[in-house]
Image: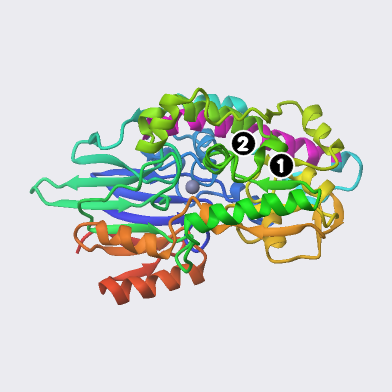
Amino acid sequence: MRVIFHGAAGEVTGSCHEVEAAGHRLLLDCGLIQGSRADEARNREDFGFDSEAIDAVVLSHAHIDHCGRLPLLVKRGFRGPIWTQRATADLLKVMLEDSAKLAQADAERARRRLHEGRGGRDDEEELEPLYTLDDVTRTLKHVRAIDYDAPTALFPGLVLTLRDAGHILGSASVELVETAADGTRRTLVFSGDLGPNGTPILRDAAPVPHADLLLLEATYGGRLHRERAATVTELGEIFHEAWRDRGNVIIPAFAVGRTQELLYAFAQHFEEWGLGRWQIFLDSPMATKVLAVYERHAELFDEEAARVFATTPHPLRLKNLHLTDSTEESMAINRIDSGAIIIAGSGMANGGRVRHHLRHRLPFERNHVVFVGYQAQGTLGRRLVDGAAYVRVLGSEVPVRAKRHTVGGLSAHADQAGLLDWYGSVGGRPDTLLVHGEDDAREALARELRRRFDADVELALPDMARTVGR
Ligand SMILES: [Zn+2]
């Protein structure tokens, strides 16, 4: 068994690893590259492998940086099954349909720019959408949904088991066990994205019994999150301060995971955070659809959430929560002078409705922007977090006077301590390749893994190949 790295090796987005096992070729994830326009243009390039030669895909979870190039893979000739957890299969439809619509809108913008004579070579390349809704429909027909902890034979001599990764609903760590003709077994484990223990709604990431080679995510490999309790206090303070400022609060949030956990936290701390006096907007039709998928999968909740959902009708749908659907409803929020909490995507503010809210609200000191998730290099969110005084949003140069807060304790990713604990739970103390993290985060995690576990650790690089077991 062998692994070859194609994406999220030295960066965070575009997760895509190729595996040769039991005489077949598989992909672990096939995610979209996100970031600056130049980064995103790389989605159109060759994968670095032949799509027709891939026999199966195993998808760890439904975030777009893990699943967003699947329709492109199908468009380029992939015909095999896409194995994934049941809830991920439900979320995948929502994610990919949204992604196709965004691709269509990007292509239309490029055509308009060219038509008006202000386009460039980039626009010519982007005239064709990356993929369409038809490609998505074709892709979804390949999905084979399975449960956690249910060993599934993919090919003779190759068994897949998905384990709860505690990151978003349906997220999984992937275990592939190859048994050779002579009975020798080799186990490859891909952590997927790992959630921190204690994530609201979800169960904690499950331990893995054994690995000969481990691909471990390292998004927050160099950082420790604040305690969740401190985060709850901090968020409450921000809402109270924003109310005193007679301002508004904008929260760029990933439509899957972050948003549902935020709404859950809103419900849990409704009184304490003084939320009853605000108008709260979930301005993301996609997040609203995902909300419905979460509500359908109570079988995956942790004990506390299962109890809350069993005893409260619609615990995530607060009485002052407005779910906005049309563009007109979204634009109408701009007319509210103060007292609005606006949750809108995208989570890194590089797309979606949050951009028009930011353009409208950033110039005013009374407003507050709260970042609750990872902000990749090259995104608008990262520039705001890094303290930019001016940013370009939807074609205008906007001064940034709004207060900015980064609330780390709500992250969907385990921090360094969490990653080390999870590594410690993997049987066999495997050789490890770090993926899905910027280099400083991966180096910091590698140092700690060597120090604490005397582990054999490397940073995965694009096109690097490694054999499983020695
Ligand atoms: Zn993720």
- Horizontal side of 303 relative to 228 (left or right) equals left
The residue lying at 48 percent from left, 25 percent from top is 312
Q: Which residue is mark 2?
A: 99
Going by the numbered disc 2, the residue's amino acid type is Ser
Label 2: which secondary element: helix
Mark 1 Cα-neighbour bin, 10 Å: few <14, some 14–19, many ≥20: many
Q: Identify the coloring.
A: rainbow
Image location of residue 454, percent across then percent down: 26, 74
Mark 2 within 8 Å of ligand 1, using the beta carbon: no
| Stretch of the chain drawn in magenta | 84-112
Going by the numbered disc 1, the residue's amino acid type is Ile
Where residue 161 sits, quadrant-wise, is: top left
The residue lying at 39 percent from left, 31 percent from top is 307
- The one nearer the camera, 42 or 14, is 14
Image location of residue 439, percent across then percent down: 50, 69
Label 1: which secondary element: strand
Q: Which residue is mark 1?
A: 341
Q: Is residue 127 visible?
A: no
Mark closer to the chain start, 1 or 2: 2
Q: Is residue 324 visible?
A: yes
Q: Say whether residue 2 is magenta.
A: no
Q: Residue furthest right?
A: 116
Residue 44, label in figure: none
Image location of residue 303, percent across then percent down: 35, 36
Image location of residue 98, percent across then percent down: 62, 32
